[in-house]
Image: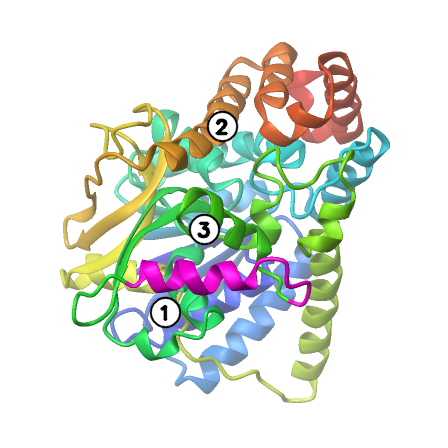
């Protein structure tokens, strides 16, 4: 079996996903083909993953493929392709996505999923992944493409509609959603045997139902306890608890993410909200700096013989592979097209996050039905910008990028149309070679 990892220099995901595969008797004897365009990062990952493989029994085989000229070789014959690239890296592109909008009074927290930063990230990533898809259609057409790259809905939606059929988008926020909530409200005793239903869009999928092992609805008590947390400045999940208070439901991804997915929380006219709701502006650049430093430190320790131990994580990747290979059923929260209206009050071309069954025949999304009107309405403000960004990636028209930014709830609520156009023009110019088709 061959498992190809695109963007092997993506340190956390490379270790977690390949480490998870090495924990599986079904997968551990595979060839793990590492692909990257950065020679240093590729070599560092190969060192660390090679050493990890040795300490876990040496069953697998780690191979490396550097540069676009070796991309087809990396993909040839692959059974599974994991995507974890970051086009443009922390520098220059992430820095550009944060610093230029600041000049216009537009502040962000993560900027990888929606907002003006998410739009730019999608536009520079989609052409690269489309190149992957073209190669896969030629050299591994029956492989499964497991996408971990943000912006998840835009990127996965584009690939599923236009590039490669066997594609699913994966995120780890579904697995941790209800456990995080129950721990936060002091109901950890209800964790064991709980039942839940989660559906919506990536990073804003709703915990629609949650019951204890006896089938009792936990939401009434959750809502009561959540209301007591509102206004507590020491509590960091204020945005999502505001969702519970005002919309009635908790959602999958963190408050720092969701703070920038709407027009309510990061407001130039209401600066006090940032402190009151514990909104960490510029959070993602800080994480990038810390992660880069941590990886360098781990690689230095490796030279001294230290290998970080790995236990199988909650990431879906290895379990999906195992299920498809063995035929053993497995349930995930996957990002797929809304074909056949899996969610009734979304358009069919939207990329949705819904329960999916995995087995030997592949990945099978399940129908959820209608979301609560208020939840669907908030999702649709994001879907509108996502679909317009996908349209811009297809058309290569600047006006479509302007429209995507205008439809983005945070950008559109803070800036007027003329300023949005100026911001988009400056970002496209700054990204230069990463957005050549818009120049």
> How far is the residue under mark 1 from the one under mark 2?
37 Å
User: Splitting the image into 4 quarters, where does residue 286 fall?
Assistant: bottom right
User: Splitting the image into 4 quarters, where does residue 167 fall?
Assistant: top left
In depth, the one of 211 and 136 nearer the eye is 211
Picture disc at residue 244: 3
**Is residue 272 positioned above or below 392 on the image?**
below
Foreground disc of the pair 3, 2: 3
Name the residue at the bottom extreme: 305
Point 61% across, 45% down: residue: 259
Count of marks placed on residues: 3
**Is residue 106 positioned above or below 334 on the image?**
above
Q: Would residue 134 be visible to someone looking at this image?
A: no
Q: Which badge, 3 or 2, is on the more N-terminal residue?
A: 3
Point 45% across, 66% down: residue: 180
Q: Report helix, strand or loop for mark 3.
A: helix
Residue 231 lies in the magenta stretch: yes
For the residues labelled 1 and 3, say whether their Cβ atoms are less than 8 Å apart: no
Q: What residue does disc 2 label? A: 381
Foreground disc of the pair 1, 3: 3
In depth, the one of 424 and 189 nearer the eye is 189
Q: Report helix, strand or loop for mark 1.
A: helix
Q: Which badge, 1 or 2, is on the more N-terminal residue?
A: 1
Image quarter (top left, top right, bottom left or bottom right) of the N terminus: bottom left
């Amino acid at each position: 079996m061959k498992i190809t990892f695109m963007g092997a220099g993506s340190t956390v995901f490379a270790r977690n996903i390949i480490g998870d595969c090495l924990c599986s008797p079904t997968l551990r004897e595979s060839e793990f083909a590492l692909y990257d365009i950065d020679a240093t990062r590729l070599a560092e990952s190969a060192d660390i993953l090679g050493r990890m493989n040795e300490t876990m029994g040496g069953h697998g085989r780690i191979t490396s493929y550097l540069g676009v000229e070796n991309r087809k070789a990396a993909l040839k014959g692959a059974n599974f392709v994991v995507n974890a690239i970051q086009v443009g890296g922390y520098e220059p592109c992430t820095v550009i996505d944060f610093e230029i909008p600041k000049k216009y009074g537009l502040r962000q927290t993560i900027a990888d999923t929606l907002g003006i930063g998410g739009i730019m990230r999608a536009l520079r990533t989609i052409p690269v992944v489309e190149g992957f898809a073209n190669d896969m259609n030629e050299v591994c057409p029956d492989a499964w493409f497991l996408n971990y790259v943000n912006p998840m809905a835009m990127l996965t939606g584009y690939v599923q509609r236009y590039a490669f059929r066997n594609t699913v988008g994966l995120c780890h926020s579904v697995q941790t959603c209800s456990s995080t909530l129950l721990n936060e409200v002091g109901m950890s005793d209800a964790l064991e045997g709980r039942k839940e239903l989660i559906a919506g869009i990536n990073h804003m999928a709703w915990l629609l139902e949650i019951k204890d092992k006896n089938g009792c609805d936990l939401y009434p008590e959750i809502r009561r306890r959540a209301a007591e947390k509102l206004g507590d400045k020491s509590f960091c999940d204020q945005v999502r608890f505001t969702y519970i208070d005002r919309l009635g439901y908790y959602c999958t991804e963190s408050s720092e993410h969701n703070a920038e997915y709407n027009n309510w929380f990061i407001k130039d006219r209401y600066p006090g909200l940032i402190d009151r709701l514990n909104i960490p502006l510029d959070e993602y650049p800080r994480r990038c700096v810390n992660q880069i430093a941590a990886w360098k430190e781990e690689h230095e320790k490796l030279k001294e013989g230290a290998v970080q131990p790995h236990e199988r994580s909650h990431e879906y990747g290895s379990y999906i592979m195992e299920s498809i290979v063995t035929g053993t059923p497995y349930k995930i929260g996957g990002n797929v097209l809304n074909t056949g209206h899996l969610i009734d009050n979304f358009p069919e071309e939207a990329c949705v996050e819904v329960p999916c069954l995995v087995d030997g025949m592949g990945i099978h999304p399940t129908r959820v039905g209608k979301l609560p009107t208020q939840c669907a309405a908030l999702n649709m403000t994001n879907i509108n910008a996502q679909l317009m960004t996908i349209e811009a990636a297809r058309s290569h028209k600047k006006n479509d990028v302007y429209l995507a930014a205008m439809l983005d709830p945070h950008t559109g609520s803070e800036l007027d149309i003329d300023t949005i156009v100026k911001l988009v023009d400056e970002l496209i110019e700054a990204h230069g070679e990463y957005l050549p088709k818009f120049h």
